[in-house]
Amino acid sequence: MRNTLLRHASSWILAMAVVAFAIQPVSATNPPKHHRILLIAGSKSHGPGMHEYLKTARLLKVMLDRAGLKDVETEVVYDGWPTNLSDLDTADTIVFISDGMQWSPWTFTPERIAAIQKQIDRGSGFMIFHFATYIPFQFQREGLAWAGGYVEYDGPKHPQMYFTQKTLTSEVVFPSPDHPVMHGVKPFKVTDEFYYKPTFVGGCLGITQLLRVPELPADPKATLPGPLAGPKDQVTMWAYDRPPTPASKIPGRSIGATFGHFYNNWQNDDYRKLVLNAIVWSAHIDVPKDGLQSAWVDDAEVDRVLGPTPAPVKSPLEPPK
């Protein structure tokens, strides 16, 4: 009798173990996807405190690594382009923090354009920051298809090279406060060199305006006060939900951010949160409801974590001063 009871008890325990295993949460058998963020820092072309591409990419890496994101890896590439193209193939988003215009890293050769197009086709995220939003008219198709928009400085509209930019101090406006990139971001005031009057994809399909600077003038060379640019022309940051491609049924995500001239703006909590949110959103990572938390990290601490900042290498296509 006792042996019979033991056999029944053993069978009951085994059955309960099978049931418990069967009802395990899906997440236990399908772990979260590993994400990889690639930060590409261009060659430095301005004086101290401006266009600090290397320092910015390294700072962003430290802040992202400390943001509490799970299964997220960040990597910094120096001098504008990876030495190993396979680095691009596994990135969930590619962030260019570099010069723009005709010496933008990805416009050097048709091979580089093809390499980025490959990533866009597979659905990788894509982000261009500050000077990288200045794209030559000859690469308009790529600028629109990859980022949804860009800032023109040459081409049919401009008989000579023309820069639509203005340095000023202004409160910023959030045209789409419910977008995930805006999670936890409070209105702030900032001094920056803003590029504006962006050109967007036809009908602005897939474009969400994220940041507008209401004090930008209609004529960037005019002295304020004066006539102001229209609301659309004052957009300095946007998100682009790219359409699906044959290679990727999931629409890609892109960000254009035209600000970022002065390095000391990273000490502004909401400025940091805005950019960090944008990067992770472009990588298809959920943005926390209060946004990514971060603290300012000074140069000494970044160097302690990542080692000394490499010496900047001058862009080979930059025109002489």
Image (cartoon, grey):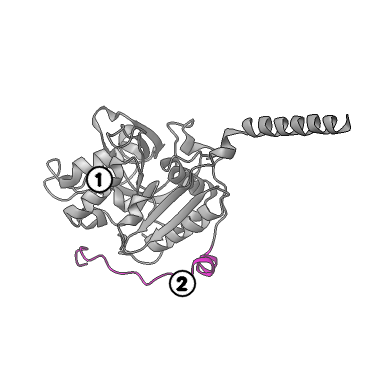
Q: Magenta part mainly helix, strand or loop?
A: loop
What residue is drawn where x is 36% and y is 46%? 127
Q: Residue 117: which numbered mark, if any?
A: 1
Which residues, given as a range, are shown in magenta?
298-321
Q: 66 or 165, which lies in front?
A: 66
- In this rendered view, identify the residue nearer to me: 139 or 210: 139
- Mark in the foreground, 2 or 1: 1
- Where residue 243 sits, quadrant-wise, is top left
Q: Amino acid at mark 2?
A: Pro
The answer to whether 77 is drawn above or below residue 210 in the figure is below
User: Is 241 rendered above or below residue 309?
Assistant: above
Residue 100 appears in the rendering: yes
- Label 2 crowd (10 A; few <14 / some 14-19 / many >=20): few
User: Would residue 228 be visible to someone looking at this image?
Assistant: no
Q: The N terminus appears in which quarter of the rendering? A: top right
Lower position in the chain sequence, tag 2 or tag 1: 1
- From the image, which quarter does the C terminus lie in? bottom left
Side of 36 where 151 appears, left or right: left
Residue at 19 percent of width and 48 percent of height: 136
In the visual, does 139 lie left or right of 259?
A: left
Nearer to the camera, 162 or 266: 266
Q: Is residue 168 magenta?
A: no
Q: Residue at x 41, y 42 (%)?
A: 282
- For disc 2, the marked residue is 308
Q: Are marks 2 and 1 in contact (CB under 8 Å)?
A: no
- Identity of the residue drawn at 30% across and 51% down: 132
Residue 212 position in % (x across, y down) = 39, 37
